[in-house]
Structures are given as structure tokens and as C-alpha cells.
Image (cartoon, grey):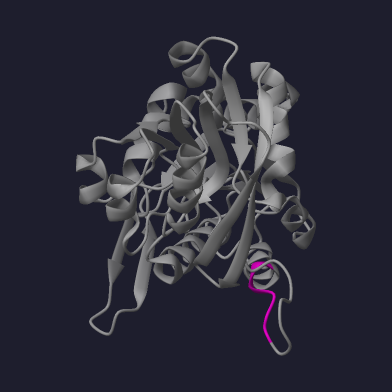
Amino acid sequence: MSTMSLFSGNSNPNLAKRIAEYLSKPLGSAKLTRFSDGEIQVEIQENVRRQEVFVIQSTCNPVNDNLVELLLMIDALKRSSASYITAVIPYFGYARQDKKVAPRVPISAKLVADLITNTGVNRLITIDLHAGQIQGFFDIPVDNLYAAPVMLDYIKSNFSGDDLVVVSPDAGGVERARAFAKRLHATLAIVDKRRSAPNKAKAMAIIGDVENKVVIIFDDMVDTAGTIAEAAGIIKAKGAKSVHACCTHAVLSGPAVERIENSSLETLVVTDTIPLRENAIECKKIKQLSISKLVGEAIIRSYRGDSIHCLFV
């Protein structure tokens, strides 16, 4: 069997270190620098010939830089005769642009999938794709893991009782929220939301009973936090005891942290698929959980040729 090697880009070094620690494997030596005009230069500084390589890189902000860095690392590894390359992308950027929503616009998620595939990568591991059909944009195997086991462990340790309600912040997240509600033996509610433009949403009404309930809003990501802040306000106004939120990807762009601070949310639980900015780290309402064990176990099972079915709940 070929030897396993781990490499990481610059997008999320702390998560890469945690994964490496879980696997008891050191991160490979790679030099990532820039030319004076901003071009990215990659140099793999150790032998990877006939090795199975895993490249850990979230394509988060700055999205384009991190994406190009990933593409160049994969190309460098391919040209260094690595036998099998798996791209581990905890947060897959451009995933929200998965369909045509207006005339003459790109399907950006498909284009990014083509770019990654055409580097010669053999497999992709990711977490909570914004839309499941993005797996079909790739011509290589894709393991779309879910942060659900990490979130469920946290909720079961911190919440109890029969007054728990799981809320989907919009119609698109109902399936995700229903799955969590089933596993938590909780009831389900839905926020009826109207979106007027990208990153601009107005919550309209609550479908379901939240009065005198402990409410947990589930979503795959929190970007500007407009949706969650608006939903939390309406839920609280409907008489909820407390409102919490769990989101896998903490994009937290623009005024997101300020909105969370000023919202009716008591806590926002996120994972480390994206590193938190300084103001998010300082925000007492935001709690971060690590998905390093989940990703590490997926890497081990992928390397050994074992099923990853047990990682789904």
C-alpha cells in the first residue's frame, strides 16, 4: 500500500493541524509564496512519488486566492508523481451559485467543480455542501460529509427537556432541520422568508409553535447573519424562551458579528471549516466546535478503502 501524506494550504492552518494531530501524521512541507505581482507560487518540498496525498484547503475568504492555491498545489503534486490525490475542502466556495437564477448568469459552482476536476485530482471530501446536487457537478467521487454528529453531541450535552423546537430559517433548509428534529425528538417549525436580493432577506412569519419553547435554528452557513438575526427576532417575539442557532460554515462577512451581538440569539454555534475573524473570536455569543475528528476519520477510511457510512447520522 502507498504511504499517506498530508498537505495544507494557507486558508485554514489550525484545522489542518488538528486533523494532522488526530491522524498522528505531520503536515508535509510545502512552500507557498507570491511573486511581486501577486501570482501564487507553490513548491512541494518533499518526495511524494507513489504516495496517496490529501490536500486540506477551505476555499473561504479570500476565496479566489485560496481556490487558485488549491489548484496549484494539486497540479504540483500531480507533476510530482503522487499516486492518488484527494482534495479535502471543508468549506466549498461558490456553492451558493449552483443554478441559473436569472438570464445570462453563470453556474459558478459547476465551473469551480470543472476547474478542480481538471487538475487531475482523484477524489474530493467536503462538509455540508450548500446544495447536494453539486456532487453531480464533479466527474470524480465526492464524499459530502455532514457536521450533524458534532452539532448533535453539543446539543445533547447542553439542552434537555420536551420544550425543544428545531427551526429551519427558510423553506430550502426544511429537510436538514427535519433530520435534526427527528434525532433530537423535537418538534419542527419553519420561517417563511422572502429574499429581495443576494444577502438581503426579510423574515415574514413562523409556521409552527415556538411559544414557551427553547428554539434552535439550523442552517448550513451564516454569511451576513441577516437571515438568522431576523428569524431570531421574530421567534422571540412569538414568545420563545430562548433562541439559539447552529450553522456549519461561519462565513460571517460584513456586519455579521455586529448583527449577532445585537440580535435575540443567545448563542451561535459554528464549526472550524472556516477560521474565525478576530471580532468573531471576541464575540461571547459565538461558540466554535471542531470537525477535525470527523474529517480525520473520513481520511483514514478513504485511505484504507473502508466505508464512511458510519460517519453519517
On the image, the x and y values in percent for residue 74 come to: 54, 59
Name the residue located 62 percent from the left edge and 68 percent from the top edge: 112
The one of 91 and 266 positioned closer to us in this rendering: 266
Q: Quadrant of the C terminus?
A: top right
For the question of whether residue 276 can be seen, the reply is no
Is residue 227 toward the left or the right of residue 173 in the image? Answer: left
Name the residue located 49 percent from the left edge and 24 percent from the top edge: 293
Q: Which residues are magenta?
A: 105-109
Verify whether residue 106 appears in magenta.
yes
Is residue 233 toward the left or the right of residue 115 in the image? Answer: left
Verify whether residue 291 appears in magenta.
no
On the image, the x and y values in percent for residue 136 come to: 80, 57
The quadrant where residue 271 appears: top left
Would you place residue 92 above or below residue 281 in this image? below
Query: Magenta: predominant secondary structure element?
Result: loop
Would you place residue 30 above or below residue 299 in this image? below
